[in-house]
Image (cartoon, rainbow, N blue to C red):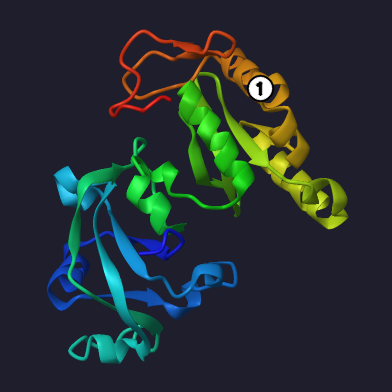
Amino acid sequence: MAEQDAVLVAIINNVADFMLVKEQQWYRIPVLSITDRFRKRWPPSWIAFYQTKIFAHEAYAINYYARVADIRRVGRRQLFPRERENQKSNKQYYQIFLHQLQRLPKAIISRRRRRIIFIQTTWRKFINAVEINDLYDESPLEDRLWDEFRRLRINAERQELVQTGNRNYALDFAVYCEHGNIDIETDGDLWHANPQRAREDNIRDNDLKTAGWHTLRFSTNQIREEMTSYCLQTITNNINNLGGIKEDGQMSRNIHLHTGETVYQTDLFDYNFVLK
């Protein structure tokens, strides 16, 4: 198995669909869900399943995965010939045929029990992931910042979906604090060079600010050359100014960058980071 083999993390939110995966060994994705951005890693070599709250003790985690055997485009009537005619009857799907379903030795969890749609990742990231945020493979800049967040135990959510008014935004990193939330964006150099992108981001930042978010943007050079002196210092200052990181059932927690420690009153996470 190549480290860069494409892995698709898909949602399973009902028992009937899980039984189709387990017993009939196929899963479906609406054709309209496969956007241009999605196609960069389409078709996947593997598919993994994120289970929602209906699955009780297996909820909000990836417990199962399988190798993809074949993919075919079919109509809904072919998938469910006994289903009564309804508004979905004419929908087109990719039917993904699977090899034997396998169980992970240890589940890949979501600490905040977040809602996801699809995550496209690599085999290397999948087999090494401890939690959902380890899977994202958007850019080297994001990965660099995520490595620092793990080292400092900054509890962030990657590619968090946020709705403000009638618009939806995917945040590179969302940090939830006691007195507000922080949106952290790794823009690269495009944000500074593209006037249209800058205009769109201005509207986006204003929408998020109205909804109570504080946006921080960092360029390629800042992340590569000024990670500790500027990026992390700015992020930790904002976290502490907003009362520290907010965690369910625990007291808020400040970050002490220069000492390499965090200040908190109770246990940090439900799982252990490996700090190297």
Residue type pointed to by label 1: Thr
| Residue in view at x 86 percent, y 51 percent | 193
Residue 118 quadrant: bottom left
Looking at the image, residue 159 lies above or below residue 5: above
Residue 119 quadrant: bottom left
| Residue in view at x 45 percent, y 14 percent | 253
Say which of 31 and 126 sits in front.
126
| Residue in view at x 67 percent, y 28 percent | 227
- Image spot of residue 259 (x, y percent): 54, 8
Q: Can I make out residue 175 in this image?
A: no
- Local packing at callout 1 (Cα closer than 10 Å; few below 14, some 14-19, many 20+) is some
- Image spot of residue 231 (x, y percent): 68, 26
Looking at the image, residue 150 lies above or below residue 193: above
Quadrant assignment for the C terminus: top left
Quadrant assignment for the N terminus: bottom left
Say which of 67 and 39 sits in front.
67
Q: Can I make out residue 207 in this image?
A: yes
Q: Dot 1 corresponds to which residue?
A: 228
